[in-house]
Amino acid sequence: MSLQTSTKRPIVVFGPSGTGKSTLLKRLFAEYPNDFGFSVSNTTRKPRAGEIHGRDYHFLTPEEFVAAIGRNEFIEHAEFSGNRYGTTIQAVKDVADSGKTCILDIDVQGVKSVKNTDLDARFIFVAPPSEEELERRLRGRGTDSEESIHKRLEAAKKELDYGNQEGSCDTKIVNDDLDAAYKKLVSFIFA
Ligand SMILES: Nc1ncnc2c1ncn2[C@@H]1O[C@H](COP(=O)(O)OP(=O)(O)OP(=O)(O)O)[C@@H](O)[C@H]1O
């Protein structure tokens, strides 16, 4: 890794589902299209038409995926409808090597895992103004079933407990007014 790219410290964004992480990041990518990137995930599912290995996903066989787990290459991995998905440490480093700052939008488990790597990431906790407002946003988004909303609110407690712990993040942004939260995000990132 060159000296220049080694300064591109990854940025980890975490916080409860519905708190507005994607909304904030979408705005960041729109305003700075050349500065930030997401890592390319690994998956055992078959490529769909038009998908390119290394761009859309790193397509692995189940055996290759298991071997990579054995070598502790993953920050996080999970299984969805019979296929495995995961983010490797190397995939995050690849973003820095391409001259961009890698943005990771992950859960608390992933945050803890990143802290056990040499990625030297910076951590942003995005918090909702209140639990009531979080529920309102999850419902207002209109993308989740009642069951999914309940699951997300249940998981939110863990995210909030962790994020509010001393030393868990480098900055906490309460996403109350979106413009104000976005300004805080940008000033932290470019500080
Ligand atoms: N500051 C804000 N004020 C009001 N509504 C907001 C604000 N920020 C985001 N929202 C709305 O809240 C909903 C949830 O936001 P979003 O999908 O960005 O959350 P998320 O944290 O990325 O969730 P997930 O982890 O599930 O992807 C969306 O409908 C979004 O438009």
Image: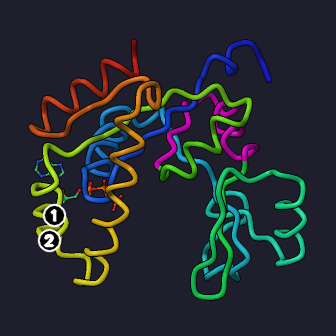
For ligand 1, tell me if the residue under mark 2 lies within 8 Å.
no
Q: Position of residue 27 (x, y in %)?
A: 27, 41
Ligand 1 sits in which quadrant? Answer: bottom left
Tell me if residue 117 comes above or below residue 51 in the rendering.
above
Amino acid found under the numbered disc labelled 1: Glu
Which disc number belongs to residue 139?
Answer: 2
Count residues near mark 1 (Cα–Cα under 10 Å), then give few for <14, some for 14-19, many for 20+: many
Q: Taking 169 as reference, is 188 left or right?
A: left
Q: Secondary structure at mark 1?
A: helix
C-alpha span from label 2 to label 1: 6 Å
Q: Position of residue 12 (x, y in %)?
A: 49, 38
Q: Which residues are magenta?
A: 89-105
Count residues near mark 2 (Cα–Cα under 10 Å), then give few for <14, some for 14-19, many for 20+: some
Amino acid found under the numbered disc labelled 2: Arg
Q: Residue at x 28, y 42 (%)?
A: 24
Quarter of the image with the C terminus in it: top left
Q: Position of residue 41 (x, y in %)?
A: 64, 59
Q: Nearer the viewer, residue 153 or 63?
A: 153
Tell me if residue 67 comes above or below residue 88 in the rendering.
below
Quarter of the image with the N terminus in it: top right
Q: Residue at x 25, y 58 (%)?
A: 18
- The reply to whether dot 2 and dot 1 touch (C-beta < 8 Å) is yes
Tell me if residue 36 comes above or below residue 148 in the rendering.
above
Residue 109 sits inside the magenta stretch: no
Q: Position of residue 173 (x, y in %)?
A: 26, 32
Q: Quadrant of residue 141?
A: bottom left
Q: Quadrant of residue 83?
A: bottom right
Q: Taking 182 as reference, is 120 left or right?
A: right
**Residue designated by label 1:** 135
Q: Quadrant of residue 171?
A: top left
* Colouring rule applied to residues: rainbow
